[in-house]
Image: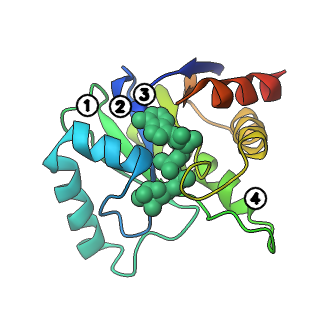
Amino acid sequence: MEIRLVQGDITEQDVDAVVNAANSSLLGGGGVDGAIHRRGGPEILQECRALRASHYGAGLPTGQAVATTAGRLPARWVIHTVGPVHSAAEDRSELLASCYRESLRVADELGAATVAFPAISTGIYGWPMDDGARIALSTVRRASTSVVEVRFVLFDAAAHAAFERSLG
Ligand code: AR6
């Protein structure tokens, strides 16, 4: 598997699947989630509502992932995953790692060969960027998956630099 780091906007990526840093409601929010729904259009929200009704009445649990159409995005699918809120009192790293692993598992189910990830939990959910980058890269490197390209799409230069440092 090839790992690529790019600085940019995840909604512009020409990949099979883009991963959304969602919340368990699946009904949208700010950050990446807001950008994906804005740019992708109402079809994504419609499918998220249907998934809530059919499978996730109590919400999508933290660390899990589920796919919908990508609406008007260049991608074919959006894989929604729920990152953990960072906590100083409790180590939630395993939940963050699970987001990456589960998203790749869903990508394999879909037959997606190229997948774009944001730096999950490092915005509104408060995860320190260096640690978020370390967990993201080590988890993806160790994953057993048919995905051939994982592209980390980092919003700003600082995030890109943190991933570069972690990639080594
Ligand atoms: N493309 C790539 N990266 C982005 C983009 C973008 N368009 N926009 C922001 N980022 P966040 P979280 C970066 O807050 O921390 C939502 O309200 C951002 O700089 O999107 O997992 C959800 O509904 C940061 O580094 O996700 C949840 O309630 C990273 O993406 C909650 O936020 C993740 O930031 C999830 O919080």
Marks 1/2 in contact by CB < 8 Å: the verdict is yes
Q: Which SS class for mark 2?
A: helix
Q: Position of residue 140 (x, y in %)?
A: 68, 37
User: In which image quadrant can residue 73 be found?
Assistant: top left
Q: Quadrant of the N terminus?
A: top right
- Residue 51 shows in this picture: yes
Residue at mark 2 to residue at mark 3: CA–CA distance: 5 Å
Q: Position of residue 7 (x, y in %)?
A: 54, 21
Amino acid carrying mark 2 in the image: Thr
Say which residue label 2 marks: 11
Badge number at residue 9 = 3
Looking at the image, tell me whether mark 1 or mark 2 is earlier in sequence order.
2
Q: Is 60 situated left or right of 29 in this image?
A: right
User: In which image quadrant can residue 28 be found?
Assistant: bottom left
Q: Which SS class for mark 1?
A: loop
Q: Quadrant of the C terminus?
A: top right
Badge number at residue 151 = none
Residue at mark 1 to residue at mark 2: CA–CA distance: 6 Å
| Callout 3 crowding tier (Cα within 10 Å): few <14, some 14–19, many ≥20 | some
Say which residue label 4 marks: 93
Q: Residue at x 24, y 43 (%)?
A: 38
Determine if the C-beta at disc 4 is less than 8 A from ligand 1: no
Looking at the image, tell me whether mark 4 or mark 1 is earlier in sequence order.
1
Badge number at residue 73 = 1
- Between residues 80 and 113, which one lies in front from this camera angle? 80
